[in-house]
Amino acid sequence: MAVGCAFDCACLARQPATAPPAGSSEPAGAKLPSASGFVVRFDKAVSDKAFSGRVYVFATKRSGGEPRLSASNWFMPPMILSRDVKGVGAGGTVEFSLEPGAAMTAFPTAFGEWEKRAYQVQAVARLSTTAPVPGAGEGDLYSEPLQVEFTGNADGVGGAGGKPVELVLSKVVAAKEFRETSRIKYFEMKSDKLSAFHGKPYTVKAGVVLPEAFDDPANKDRQWPTLYVVTGFGGDHHSVRGYAGANYKDMLVVMPDATNYYGHSVFADSAVIGPWGSALVDEIVPAVEAKYRGAGDGSRRFVTGVSSGGWSSLWLVVTYPESFAACYSHVPDPVDFRDFQQIDLYGGSAGTPMNMFKDDKGERRPIARQGSRPMLYYDKFVAMETALGAGGQIESFEAVFSPKNAAGTPRALFDRATGNIDPETAKAWEAYDIRLVIERNWATLGPRLKGKLHVYAGEMDNFYLEGATRLLKESLSKLGSDAVVEIVPGMGHKEAPEGRKAMLEAIAKVK
């Protein structure tokens, strides 16, 4: 979907197979600390400045492991307590208390509704200004995981039933290492466009796979056809090593990192997150191709992606048609906002707004399914994102498609309490409705898109994305476009094999 990269991608939520650090949980048979709440303390050794931002306690009912590492798991998320704080000094504390009126956001239930049982708990302070997942961004602080017996407040807060347990923020998330090989390379550069927008140096990254014969002296002056791969939500440039196989040996493969503090940039220019699309086309593409003898012009340059990357690939070709020979877009996020995962964003009015949480019959709207069975609902998904803060899928859409509000943050598409859509914000989203953009500019855009559009949706998309692609197909057909738009029977949320095959055949014809 928007809501995710490929349904079977790592970003969707598998709990990482990370062993708990030594001493992080109690030995078998030992009495667990009794907890009626939590006190999170900033260790002076790792944090000597006042902190303002969001602090978390993550908890799971599983013993062992690090609860923070499941924060991006949509289908098996941890329990979440979070608080926004200001000016907490070195050595200072933040309390998560059962006292009435205690300030915090909780998911999936209020703190006072937690079961009395054992939990694996871990605290996090979010310091990274570029990473979308709290507790995973370089510079974020976290505590050792600890197993506790939660007592609730049956005996009064801090009474005989337990007392607040201290979690010490003593660890710092390190930068994720990019392992290079003879063919797999790391690329980074300062983006002048994004730096100017943010008012500070902004570095962009990419993973690169060189052609197999790149170092052959006979090819020293050869420029290679180049494939840009945009990952789905939750992915980044580290996934490029999956393109080092035989199918991609005769091309340069570039995987630019689309992530930012709000989630996925989808490489569109935005009022909130900045000019990501033009930064890619005007800065990253020329620089990486100059360094690695890439395409050099749009006739030999292709772009593909799955889910959010599928939307990105289609958007880039529609927005910069001369910069790419073709796109191969797989299960893209909504490409027609009349069917935004079954929701018509334009269907309401100020008097009778459309609702994100409930359909016309008052039934809860699902956001994910397995086959025909709903697995996740909009209201619960949004509640989880609210507890986590910026970086979730829904606010990622808003960060790209919405104008700024007075605070400089994305204007909300809908009320988080009621689910009611704001028609004025929905109207602003028209600028990113790919079907509308094509229709409104067809007279000049149509000839420039000839032979370039290839879109593949799954008939049983796990995030209900096929409906929007059907509407796009109908629109393009009426316009007389030669676009290839296929709804693959029985397919879920993944790359379409026929689309990959067609793309590889097209690239093979490039000299």
Image (cartoon, grey):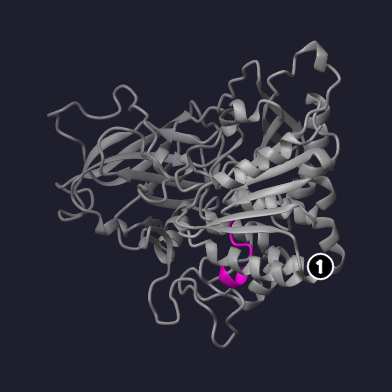
Residue 360 visible, this orientation: yes
Q: Residue at x 64, y 72 (%)?
A: 426
- Residue nearer the viewer, 54 or 129: 129
In the picture provided, is 440 more to the left or to the right than 328? right
Q: Residue furthest left?
A: 29
| In magenta stretch: residue 339 | yes
Q: Position of residue 369 (x, y in %)?
A: 40, 59
- x and y, in percent, of residue 220 in the image: 83, 16
Magenta segment range?
A: 332-340
Picture residue at 76% right of the left edge, 13% below the top:
216
Q: Which residue is mark 1?
A: 442
- In the rendered view, would you say 25 is above or below 234? above
Secondary structure character of the magenta stretch overall: loop
Q: Position of residue 450 (x, y in %)?
A: 80, 56
Question: Residue 255, located in which quarter of the rendered image?
Answer: top right
> What's under tag 1, amino acid-wise?
Trp
The quadrant of the rendering that contains the C terminus is top right
Residue appearing at x 74%, y 60% in the figure: 482
Mark 1, other Cα within 10 Å: few <14 / some 14–19 / many ≥20? some
Task: Name the residue: 14% across, 33% down.
Answer: 31
From the viewer's perspective, tell me whether residue 164 is left or right of residue 302.
Answer: left
